[in-house]
């Protein structure tokens, strides 16, 4: 006997896969079409509010009209009668495309910092979807990491368009916020219950991006005392990209970028500024080449730490190689090749932070426990030579950085 709950005698509910402030989402099977779907069921207390149900229906219909590869498709809507007699209520639900993947919320919860290039690619995908929905007069109003899902094949999906706000072809006083938002991601106008705009979604997207870049919760990045976002010190990032994010985070809606297109033009002015898309045509923007140039700049401490690592490790490599081949020319050549490889790995950020400690520690341990690799040189001398090499490398790097800054200011 099959005792699973069914909706409309068609949708067989399975596991609960999500819960939000207004609804629960279940994995389900559409028995008529024999496919897996996701069903969002309105919370019981909200289902007793006729005005809310009416808005829920309108907004579900608006979301169903969206057809975009990054937006989860809405297949069907309906209502299920629950309870009996006077206590019976019509509980609305939305049937959506099922996406098997993980949300970006998992990255924030883990405390991992997302690389800038990957965060940019995510931003482009979301901006593409928002540009399309805004052109159709629909504002999402709840952009956050848990509403951006990465399917197992890497494709991104923007979730929860069932809670959108339709702002076109409606009376002027109906475009105010409905109070559905996520703390920390909603801008001031939305939290105050005032009118929402496309820049409302852009604000929430910027908060999402900085949480992914820093690995910090939004609440830890906002300084309530100064009423400002304090996130730049958490990471090393290209100043132009940081300025773009800060503009998206400005408190006044009119001060931010007014559309997804404006953000893309700021990110990639050479390739996007000439692309003017019709308002009814979904953007088809691919990550242009300049994305690779938006590489987080190295902070001074990172440069000096890398120089110390290169000098220390280079000295250990040279000592070990000379003990093996006894030829200074071959030793210097091979050591230079290996050292260049390590420096290249640093520039690509393949080696960071603890790697710069672990690699020299392992190299030193090998030389310490295998005496013939140091040609009978006392271990104290090995330490001194490696430290001197590190200090020389730091000095040379600092000098070149100073000269570079002076030349840049002059030119």
Image (spheres, grey):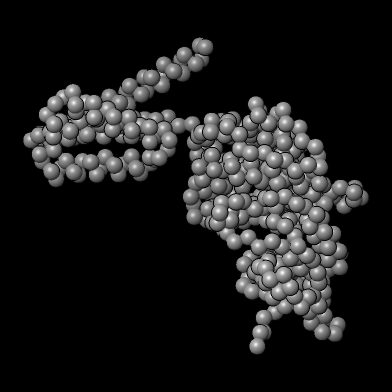
- Is residue 35 at all visible to an observer of this figure? yes
Q: Camera-side residue: 349 or 255?
A: 349
Q: Quadrant of residue 286?
A: top right
Q: Camera-side residue: 233 or 274?
A: 274
Up the image or down, 286 lies above or below 7; here it is above
Percent position of residue 131, x then y: 74, 42
Percent position of residue 234, x then y: 50, 41
Q: Is residue 326 left or right of residue 411?
A: left
Q: Quadrant of residue 340?
A: top left
Which residue occupies 86% across, 64% down?
Answer: 54
Q: Is residue 390 left or right of residue 136?
A: left
Which residue occupies 72% across, 28% down?
Answer: 274
Up the image or down, 273 lies above or below 211; here it is above
Up the image or down, 375 lies above or below 29; here it is above
Percent position of residue 235, x then y: 50, 39
The extreme front residue here reads 33
Which residue occupies 53% across, 33% down?
Answer: 292
Which residue occupies 78% across, 42% down?
Answer: 281
Q: Camera-side residue: 180 or 82?
A: 82
- Is residue 214 at all visible to an observer of this figure? no
In the rendered image, the quadrant that contains the N terminus is bottom right
Percent position of residue 48, x then y: 82, 72
């Amino acid at each position: 006997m099959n005792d699973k709950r069914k909706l409309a005698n068609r949708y067989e509910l399975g596991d609960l896969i999500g819960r939000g402030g207004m609804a629960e989402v279940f994995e389900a099977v559409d028995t008529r079409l024999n496919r897996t779907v996701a069903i969002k069921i309105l919370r019981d207390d909200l289902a007793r509010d006729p005005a809310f149900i009416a808005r829920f229906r309108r907004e579900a219909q608006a979301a169903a009209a969206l057809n975009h590869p990054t937006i989860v498709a809405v297949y069907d809507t309906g209502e299920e009668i629950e309870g009996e007699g006077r206590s019976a209520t019509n509980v609305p639900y939305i049937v959506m495309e099922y996406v098997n993947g993980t949300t970006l919320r998992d990255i924030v919860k883990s405390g991992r910092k997302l690389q800038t290039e990957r965060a940019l690619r995510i931003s482009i995908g979301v901006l593409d979807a928002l540009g399309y929905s805004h052109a159709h007069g629909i504002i999402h109003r709840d952009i956050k990491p848990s509403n951006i899902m990465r399917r197992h094949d890497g494709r991104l999906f923007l979730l929860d368009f069932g809670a959108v706000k339709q702002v076109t072809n409606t009376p002027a006083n109906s475009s105010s916020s409905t109070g559905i938002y996520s703390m920390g991601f909603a801008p001031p106008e939305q939290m105050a219950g005032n009118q929402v705009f496309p820049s409302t979604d852009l604000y929430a997207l910027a908060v999402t991006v900085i949480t992914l870049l820093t690995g910090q919760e939004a609440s830890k990045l906002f300084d309530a005392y100064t009423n400002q976002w304090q996130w730049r010190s958490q990471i090393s990032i290209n100043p132009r990209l940081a300025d773009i994010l800060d503009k998206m985070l400005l408190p006044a809606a009119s001060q931010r970028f007014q559309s997804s297109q404006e953000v893309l033009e700021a990110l990639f002015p050479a390739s996007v500024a000439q692309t003017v898309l019709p308002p009814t045509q979904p953007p088809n923007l691919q990550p242009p080449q300049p994305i690779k140039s938006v590489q987080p700049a190295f902070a001074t401490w990172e440069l000096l730490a890398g120089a110390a690592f290169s000098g220390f490790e280079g000295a250990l490599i040279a000592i070990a190689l000379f003990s093996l081949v006894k030829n200074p020319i071959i030793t210097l050549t091979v050591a230079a090749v290996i050292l260049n490889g390590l420096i290249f790995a640093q520039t690509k950020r393949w080696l960071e932070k603890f790697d710069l400690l672990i690699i020299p520690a392992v190299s030193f341990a090998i030389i310490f426990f295998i005496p013939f690799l140091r040609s009978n040189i006392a271990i104290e001398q090995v330490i001194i030579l490696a430290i001197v090499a590190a200090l020389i490398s730091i000095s040379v790097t600092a000098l070149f950085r100073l000269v570079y800054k002076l030349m840049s200011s002059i030119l």
